[in-house]
Image (cartoon, rainbow, N blue to C red):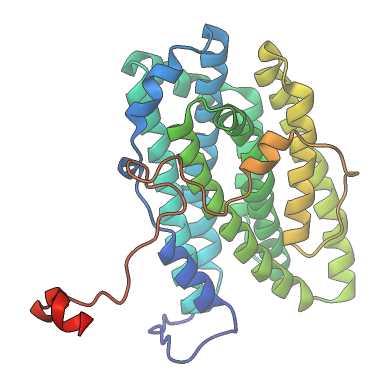
Amino acid sequence: MTNLKAVNWNRPDDEYTEDFLNQNFMQIWREHEIPLDDDKMSWITLSPTEQDVYKKVLGGLTFLDTEQGAEGMPLIMQRVESPQRKAVLGIMGAMEHIHAKSYSSIFATLVSAEESDKVFEWADSNPFIQRKGTIISGYYRNIQSPESLYMAMVASVFLESALFYSGFYYPLLLAGHGKMTASGEIIDLIMRDEAVHGQYIGTLAREVYGELSHESQAALDREVETLLRRLYDNEAGYTVDLYAPIGLEEDVLRFLRYNFNRALMNLGRPTHFPDEEINPVVLNGIDTSTKIHDFFSKKGNGYQKAVNIVPLTDADFCVEEAIN
């Protein structure tokens, strides 16, 4: 067991980790900054079936964020030697907990505590959710070599860049049609974080992979393909079970395949599924560039913190002198 070293950011460990650190700092947010009460009127316009799907979507997403915050980031962080990389992974793990808490805030705004409890009971007993948790957790808890570290990183990227998105679909669709826009704003913020997480872990994974022998790489290629198929088949079952009551299962399956391809690209791998047409409303929703619903009440994912603030002085108010 190696001794822990003090992190020295004045001596970069690589060319990209500090950039990811700064990006994570710029993206820090809290759920109370979004006015969730704005969704109350929209919520009552949804049918009971639509409300049920929406609640279950959030319950499933909460499970994944809990897994990433409690196991994914911490266990990968323990096996990464660089103190600077540990710092970035630690921040990303903390954000996963903020994501999970934000869903509870949405529940607290829209439904009773009893309804919320039932959603979490459903998530904790749903066979598809538990199966993907078991698969992913198995890789996180079995990091004993560079090869197993790589596979844990692959599992993390699949979770961050693909599995989340079957849950993101419905909030994105509703927000794109002007419904549940405050909750949709939280989804936007979470997606922005997950995009960075997938890119960073994918970058670390490519580095680990590149240092392995050709024999090890070939074996890992086969294992990645097996993991992809296991996770996709399970998520497809989850998608049909969740979305069939509102007739969206085929649309979400196309979106799921699209995002598995994106996850593979984060890992530097060729795509697996053929190109398909994605609902343009949802496709526009995953564009995490600046979005804001109005200029006064919404923080939005385009929120900018003020920097280089210069205090006002009396001279700033001397209009006549300025004109002269």
Counting every numbered tag in the picture gives: 0
Decide if residue 96 is on the left or right side of residue 298: right
Q: Is residue 1 visible?
A: no
Q: Where is residue 291 in the image (x, y as percent from the top left)?
A: 51, 47
Q: Where is residue 190 in the image (x, y as percent from the top left)?
A: 50, 47
Decide if residue 134 is on the left or right side of residue 224: left
- Between 214 and 304, the one lying in front of the other is 304
Q: Can residue 12 be seen in this view?
A: yes
Seen at 50% across and 66% down, the residue is 78
Q: Position of residue 35 (x, y in %)?
A: 33, 35
Q: Would you place residue 136 above or below residue 85 in this image?
A: above
Q: Would you place residue 155 above or below residue 205 in this image?
A: above
Q: Would you place residue 207 above or below residue 36 in this image?
A: below
The residue positioned farthest toward the top in the image shown? 48
- Between 45 and 26, the one lying in front of the other is 45
Decide if residue 213 is on the left or right side of residue 263: right
The residue positioned farthest toward the front in the image shown? 324
The residue positioned farthest toward the bottom in the image shown? 11
Seen at 47% across and 20% down, the residue is 119
Q: Quarter of the image containing the C terminus? A: bottom left
Seen at 67% across and 69% down, the residue is 203
Q: Position of residue 141 (x, y in %)?
A: 58, 53
Seen at 82% across and 53% down, the residue is 223
